[in-house]
């Protein structure tokens, strides 16, 4: 999946509040990849890096996977095809939510 091009439907645009935790504001766009089922029974969730305005959909490359050890879900990280980010840069953008989980960021199929 890392390196694959995917379309993300954004249901939580940058600047929006989490539907269950209104004090959690999304600093990046977040959505799902329709057609790819996730272990929780929903579509695969994805964070979008490299787009600094609210959007409703995005086509980009999967650059990382956030594997959660204490949850059934993994989150994919998607970015414009010509952009890359370090694990530290990714974590800085997703820590608003990922700090609550024991997880690792996988890039280029290397743990």
Image (cartoon, rainbow, N blue to C red):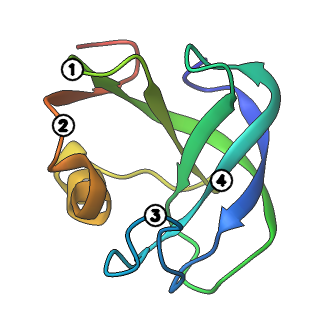
The residue tagged 1 is: 70
> CA gap, disc 1 to disc 3?
20 Å
Neighbor class of circle 2 (other Cα within 10 Å; few <14, some 14-19, many 20+) is few
Neighbor class of circle 4 (other Cα within 10 Å; few <14, some 14-19, many 20+) is many
- Along the line of sight, which residue is nearer the eye, 39 or 86? 39
Query: Where on the picture, by quarter, is residue 96?
Result: bottom left
Neighbor class of circle 3 (other Cα within 10 Å; few <14, some 14-19, many 20+) is few
Q: Residue at x 69, y 28 (%)?
A: 42
**Which image quarter holds the C terminus?**
top left
> CA gap, disc 1 to disc 4?
21 Å
In the image, farthest residue toward the front = 20
Q: Earlier in the sequence, mark 3 or mark 4?
A: 3
Q: Position of residue 105 (x, y in %)?
A: 26, 31
Callout in the foreground (3, 4): 3
Q: Which residue is drawn at 40% across and 16% down?
A: 72
Q: Position of residue 106 (x, y in %)?
A: 31, 24
Identify the disc placed on residue 23. Answer: none
Identify the disc placed on residue 20. Answer: 3
Left/right placement of residue 106 relative to residue 82 reads: left
- The secondary structure type at the circle numbered 1 is loop
The residue tagged 2 is: 101
Q: Residue at x 56, y 13 (%)?
A: 39
> CA gap, disc 2 to disc 3?
17 Å
Identify the disc placed on residue 31. Answer: 4
Q: Which residue is drawn at 65% across and 53% down?
A: 31
> CA gap, disc 2 to disc 4?
19 Å
Marks 1 and 3 in Cβ contact (< 8 Å): no
Q: Which of marks 1 and 3 is nearer the N terminus?
A: 3
- The secondary structure type at the circle numbered 2 is loop
Marks 2 and 1 in Cβ contact (< 8 Å): yes
Q: Earlier in the sequence, mark 1 or mark 4?
A: 4
């Amino acid at each position: 999946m890392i390196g694959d091009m995917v379309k993300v439907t954004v249901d939580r645009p940058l600047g929006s509040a989490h539907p269950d935790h209104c004090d959690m504001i999304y600093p990046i766009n977040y959505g799902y990849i329709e057609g790819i089922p996730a272990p929780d029974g929903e579509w695969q969730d994805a964070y979008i890096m490299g787009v600094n305005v609210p959007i409703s959909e995005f086509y980009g490359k999967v650059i990382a996977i956030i594997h959660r050890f204490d949850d059934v879900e993994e989150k994919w990280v998607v970015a414009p095809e010509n952009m890359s980010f370090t694990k530290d840069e990714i974590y800085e953008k997703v820590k608003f939510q990922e700090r609550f989980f024991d997880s690792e960021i996988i890039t280029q199929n290397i743990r």
